[in-house]
Image (cartoon, helix red, strand yellow):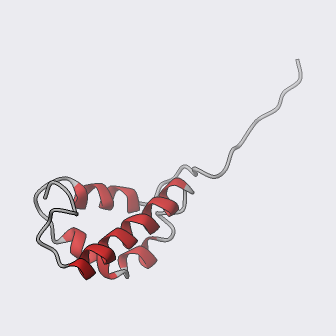
Amino acid sequence: MKNLKDSSFGEADKQSMARMMSALNVKYFAGTAGTDAEAIKAMPGYKLWLSQKEGFMSGYISSMLKPKEQSNIALEMTLTTQ
């Protein structure tokens, strides 16, 4: 699938997939996609995306949902005096 707009999915499925991707992007760039993965996986659009074996989106989505050891929302600094 080259793009969602021109895919063979019905309009309701396309909307569902777009909503899921939108929610995932918000959580991913907030650094919480890994911890909120179950909520994303429960969305109807998630299963539709994973049904796509051609293209890179199913793998991309799975990689975004992997838990990460490093936090994207926390910063640790060690202060020293010299």
Front-most of 31 and 49?
A: 49
Residues 52 and 41: in front is 52
Q: Report x, y in % for residue 59.
A: 24, 57
Q: Residue at x 11, y 71 (%)?
A: 8
Q: Quadrant of the N terminus?
A: bottom left
Q: Quadrant of residue 4?
A: bottom left
Tally of numbered tags: 0
Q: Is residue 36 left or right of residue 49?
A: right
Give the answer, above or below, for where 64 lies relative to 20. above
Q: Is 47 located above or below residue 28 in the figure?
A: below
Residue 44: percent from left, percent from top: 31, 82
The residue drawn where x is 38% and y is 57% is 64
Residue at the image point whose x is 39% and y is 62% from the top: 65
Residue 59 relative to residue 63: left or right: left
**Residue at x-position 37% and y-position 65%:** 21
Front-most of residues 69 and 40:
40
Residue 79, placed above or below residue 15: above
Q: Residue placed farthest to the top in the image?
A: 82
The quadrant of the rendering that contains the C terminus is top right
Drawn side of residue 68 relative to residue 49, left or right: right
